[in-house]
Image (cartoon, rainbow, N blue to C red):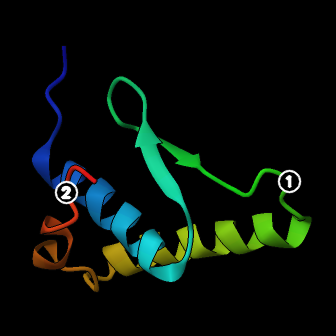
Amino acid sequence: MARRDRPACRSHDNGIYRGYELGAAVSYVGLKANVLEFIPPLTPTEDEVTEDIDIVDQAIADVNAGKVWDADVASFMMW
């Protein structure tokens, strides 16, 4: 069984946190925590879905650009 790489886990955590900051409800699921799960309104409009995708895209870009700090995310772990 493959061991989860800690830096990748931090990227997950940081991306989920940044998405939360930007207003998206996203979580990660799966046996290896490698699936993003969107948590939209019960009956989302096309605009809401597009907005959520844009937010997640921005969150990933922010993490890759080093704009999300581990220290900021630490207090939200296991939320």
- Look at the picture and state if 58 lies above or below 52: below
**What residue is drawn where x is 20% and y is 70%?**
73
Q: Compute the Cα span from label 2 to label 1.
A: 29 Å
Task: Please name the amino acid that badge 2 sits on.
Answer: Met
Foreground of the two, 41 or 1: 41
Residue occupying image coordinates x 19% and y 13%: 1
In the rendered structure, the answer to whether residue 46 lies left or right of residue 60 reads right
Up the image or down, 14 lies above or below 38; here it is below
Mark 2 surroundings: few (<14), some (14-19) or many (≥20) residues within 10 A: few
Q: Report the quarter where the C terminus lies.
A: bottom left
Left or right side of 16 for 14: left
Q: Closer to the N terminus: mark 2 or mark 1?
A: 1
Number of numbered tags placed on the structure image:
2
The image quadrant of residue 77 is bottom left
Q: Which mark is residue 77?
A: 2
27 in relation to 30, above or below:
below
Mark 2 falls on what kind of element? loop
Q: In this image, 70 relative to 68: left or right? A: left
In the rendered image, residue 48, in percent from the top left (x then y), is placed at 79, 70
Is 13 located above or below residue 74 in the figure?
above
Q: Measuring 50% from the left and 81% from the top, which residue is drawn there?
A: 22
Q: Are marks 2 and 1 in contact (CB under 8 Å)?
A: no
Q: Which residue is mark 1?
A: 43
Image position, residue 10 (x, y; %): 20, 57
